[in-house]
């Protein structure tokens, strides 16, 4: 308040020269009170602005050491950057020429130009580092994808091998079961054929023995009928009538011829055919029949 009162008293006693009217500097002012108030208001605003600028300058000068220390630390961490322009040309991008609008850079006499270059270099290094990180990320993703694909291929290969082994084991088991079943069926067919064959041979022998006994006895009326079931009508020795010797001879010849036809007409045993074994069995049965006929003729 004292400072403002003093300025007001000085301005009232010695008013400043008006622009374009230097005579007013030597003559007493005849301004109205309103003009005086406006003039005082402008002077006060200028004083306040000057005071604020001084305070700001003082605060900035107090913080200048800390700012410079921070910039030096950044310079040491980032490395040396490009140098400033020669003195007189000002810092690039920071206040223009020396003595420009930025009073901090002017007062520091380009002391911050070199740290600013380090910041530019740091930005370039960070950009290059970001690009390198992107490239490494892409390479890392590609390697991960290749590893994942290799793992999937290995897993698929193991799965195929396991399934192949499983199928081989199942095929071997089915082959073994098939061979066992085929062997069992073949054995059963052989047993059935053997039983049927033995029954037919036994029946054939009984029938031959009956016929031989009937022929040896010479009593056709007491001969029993044939046990076999031929395809034609049944034939028995009782149908023969032996009236005289000539008639008996003719009847006997007809009877023997009918017996031969009956032997040829007897059906074979019903059974399953087993390849080469059937031929051997047929030969055996034929041998048995021939043996019986030889015995009958004897």
Image (tube, rainbow, N blue to C red):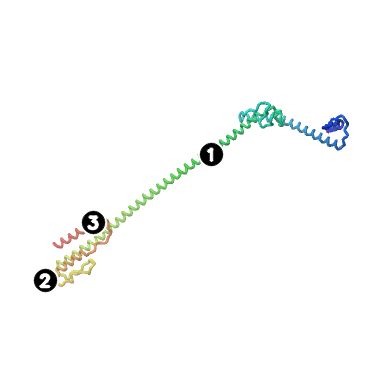
Mark 2 residue element: helix
Residue 135 or 23: which is nearer the viewer? 23
Q: Quadrant of the C terminus?
A: bottom left
Q: Which residue is mark 3?
A: 279
Q: Quadrant of the N terminus?
A: top right
In the rendered structure, find residue 204 and report the number of the disc placed on it. Answer: none
Within 10 Å of disc 1 (Cα), the crowding (few <14, some 14-19, many 20+) is few
Q: Secondary structure at mark 3?
A: helix
Query: Residue 138, which numbered label?
Result: 1
**In which image quadrant can residue 51 be found?**
top right
Q: Residues within 10 Å of mark 2 (few under 14, many from 20)?
A: few
Q: Contact (CB < 8 A) between labels 3 and 2?
A: no
Residue linked to disc 2: 246
Q: Nearer the viewer, mark 2 or mark 1?
A: 1
Report x, y in % for residue 196: 26, 61
Q: Which of label 3 and label 1 is nearer to you?
A: 1
Q: Is residue 276 left or right of residue 85?
A: left
Lateral position of residue 182 relative to residue 238, left or right: right
N-terminal of the two: label 3 or label 1? 1
Q: CA distance from mark 3 to mark 1?
A: 82 Å
In front of the other: 177 or 22: 22
Q: Is residue 89 above or below residue 282?
A: above
Residue drawn at (86%, 30%) of the image: 23
At 31% from the left and 56% from the top, the residue drawn is 185
Q: Position of residue 261 (x, y in %)?
A: 19, 65
Image coordinates of residue 220 in percent, x first then y, are 16, 70
- Front-most of residues 293 and 212: 293
Tell me, yes or no, if residue 16 can be seen here. Answer: no
Alpha-carbon span between mark 3 and mark 2: 44 Å
């Amino acid at each position: 308040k004292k400072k403002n009162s003093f300025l007001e008293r000085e301005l009232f006693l010695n008013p400043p020269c008006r622009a374009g009217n230097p005579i007013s500097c030597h003559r007493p002012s005849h301004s109205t009170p309103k003009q005086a108030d406006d003039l005082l208001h402008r002077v006060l605003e200028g004083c306040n602005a000057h005071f604020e600028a001084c305070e700001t300058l003082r605060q900035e000068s107090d913080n200048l050491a800390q700012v410079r220390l921070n910039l030096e630390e950044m310079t040491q961490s980032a490395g040396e950057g490009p140098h400033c322009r020669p003195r007189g040309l000002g810092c690039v991008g920071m206040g223009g020429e020396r003595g420009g609008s930025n009073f901090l850079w002017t007062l520091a006499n380009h002391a911050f130009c070199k740290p600013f270059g380090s910041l530019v270099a740091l930005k370039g290094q960070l950009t290059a580092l970001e690009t390198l990180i992107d490239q490494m990320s892409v390479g890392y993703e590609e390697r991960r994808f290749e590893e994942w694909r290799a793992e999937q291929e290995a897993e698929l290969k193991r799965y195929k091998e396991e399934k192949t082994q499983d199928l081989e084991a199942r095929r071997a088991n089915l082959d073994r079961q098939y061979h066992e079943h085929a062997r069992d069926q073949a054995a059963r067919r052989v047993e059935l054929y053997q039983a049927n064959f033995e029954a037919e041979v036994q029946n054939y022998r009984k029938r031959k023995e009956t016929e031989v006994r009937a022929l040896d006895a010479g009593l056709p009326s007491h001969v029993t009928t044939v046990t076999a079931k031929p395809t034609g009508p049944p034939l028995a020795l009782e149908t023969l009538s032996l009236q005289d010797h000539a008639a008996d001879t003719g009847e006997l010849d007809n009877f023997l011829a009918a017996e031969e036809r009956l032997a040829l007409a007897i059906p074979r045993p019903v059974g399953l055919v087993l390849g080469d074994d059937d031929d051997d069995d047929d030969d055996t049965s034929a041998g048995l029949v021939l043996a019986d006929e030889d015995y009958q003729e004897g």
